[in-house]
Image (tube, rainbow, N blue to C red):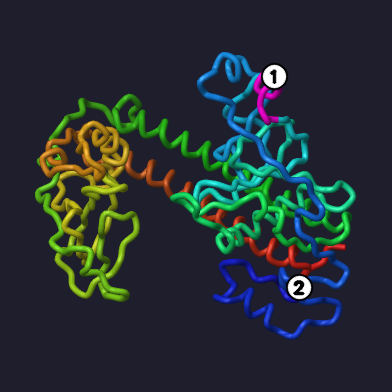
Amino acid sequence: MNEPLTVQEAPAGYQVMLDSLPVRAGYKQTEVGVIPEDWQLSTLGEICLTSSGTTPSRSMPERYYRNGSIPWVKTLDLNDSEIINTDELVTICAVEETSLRPYPIGTVLVAMYGGYNQIGRTGLLKIPAAVNQAITAIQPQKNVLLPEYLLATLNFKVEYWKSVASSSRKDPNITSQNVREFPIGYPHLPEQRAIATALSNVDALLAAQDKLIAKKRDIKQAAMQQLLTGKQRLPGFSGEWEVKRLGDVCGRVTTGKLDANAMVESGEYPFFTCAREHYFIDEYAFDADALLVSGNGANVGYVHHYTGKFNAYQRTYVLTDFNAEILYLRLFMDRNLQGRLRTEVNAGNTPYITMDTLTEMRVALPRTREEQTAIATILSDMDADLTALEQQRDKTRALKQGMMQELLTGRIRLI
C-alpha cells in the first residue's frame, strides 16, 4: 500500500485532483467528495440537535457571575480539542432566569462569530457547561455519530466555513442554520471510534511535545535571568561586570535606506524589513556581521543576527562593528529590549523605537570576551534544542493533517 501524502508533501490542488479522478470500485462521489459506498452522508441537522446560549447581563455580576458554579464557554475557551475548564463560571440564577442551559459531556461546540480567525473554532465538552450566543452546541445522536469523530471532521473542514460565511456585521460570521446544513460523511460507529482513537493518539503526542517545549522555554528564561545579569557565574569566571551604552558597544548604528517597494519576488540578497521574515532584493548595502532591529510596527524591537551581504528597510536599524560578542548582545537585547519599548512607544497606533532610545540602551557585560562567548554558547544551544523540538512538533502536526486527509475521507480504512 502506498504511504499517504502529508500536507507538506501534497502538491497544490491535491484534493481537487483526487476528486476529479474516476471513482474506484467500492467508493461513490458525494457532496463532500469521494467516500466509501458503505459510508452515510447527512447534514448535522439531520443527525444532531443544535442550539445556542446567551450572555447573562453584565450589569448584574452579583446575581449571575459572582461565586458561580456552572462552567460557561465563550469563543476564546474553544481550543479545537477537549474542554475541561472555562475562563468564567455563572450562577444557578443565571441558568434559571435566562436562556442558558448546561450541555452534557460529549457536546461539540462551534464558534459562529468573530471573523475568519474565529469562526469554526471547536471544542468537545468533557464537563457539563453552558455556552454564550456566539457558539452553536451540537449533540449527536448516540447511535449514529460519535462526538470525537464529529470534532475531528469539523477541525479538518474548518475552511468550509469561509465558503458560507456572511457579513451582516463588520466581520464574516456563520449562523446556526449554516451549522445544521454542514454535510458530513461517516462510517459505522466502530470505524468512527477507530479513526477518532488514532487521531486522539496523535493529539496526545502533540500535547506532550507542547508541554516539553513550554518546559524548555521556562528553563531557558530562567537561565537568561541568571546568566545575563551575572547572578550566576559559569565555572572559571570571576570579576566585576561593566555597564555600557549600546552605542559604545557597536561602532556603527544606522538604518536601511529602501522602502518596502524595493523588494522583489526573487533576488540575490536578503532584504530585511520590520517583519520577522526576510524578503529578497537585487542589490546590497551591507556586508557585515550585523544585528538588525525592527524599528516600528507589530514586531518593533525584534532582533535578528545575520552575517553577509544584505539590504534593509528604512525603518530597520542595522548595528555593526562590535567590540563585544555579538551573540551575547543579541541574547541580551532579546531579553531586555521589548520591556524597554513598552514604555517608550508613541501614543498612536504604530509603535516605534528611536535611534536615541536604541543607542542609549544600557548593556551589562562580562569584561572578558571569553565569558560573553561562554554564556552565548549555552543559551544558543538551548535555542537550538528548542528549534529542534518545534520542528519535531511541526512534523507531528503535518502527520496528523495527512492522517485526517486519508482517514476522514475513507481512503484508508482501519476496519
Q: Is residue 320 left or right of residue 204?
A: left
Q: Residues within 10 Å of mark 2 (few under 14, many from 20)?
A: some
Who's the residue at 62% across and 24% down the image?
Answer: 89
Q: Nearer the viewer, residue 299 or 30?
A: 30
In the rendered image of this protein, does residue 113 appear above or below residue 16?
A: above
The residue type indicated by label 1 comes to: Ile
Tell me which segment is drawn in magenta. Answer: 93-100
Q: Is residue 138 left or right of residue 375?
A: right
Q: Which residue is mark 2?
A: 30
Q: Nearer the viewer, residue 321 or 136?
A: 136
Q: Dividing the picture into quarters, in which one does residue 365 lie?
A: top left
Can residue 310 be found in the magenta stretch? no
The residue type indicated by label 2 comes to: Thr
Q: Which residue is mark 1?
A: 92
Q: Residues under labels 1 and 2: Cα distance?
A: 46 Å
SS assignment for the magenta stretch, majority: helix
Question: Can you say which quadrant of the picture contains the N terminus?
Answer: bottom right
Q: Is residue 90 left or right of residue 355?
A: right
Residue 138's disc is none
Nearest to N terminus: mark 1 or mark 2:
2
Q: Nearer the viewer, residue 326 or 344?
A: 344
Can residue 97 be found in the magenta stretch? yes
Provide residue 224's location: percent of width, then percent of height.
36, 34
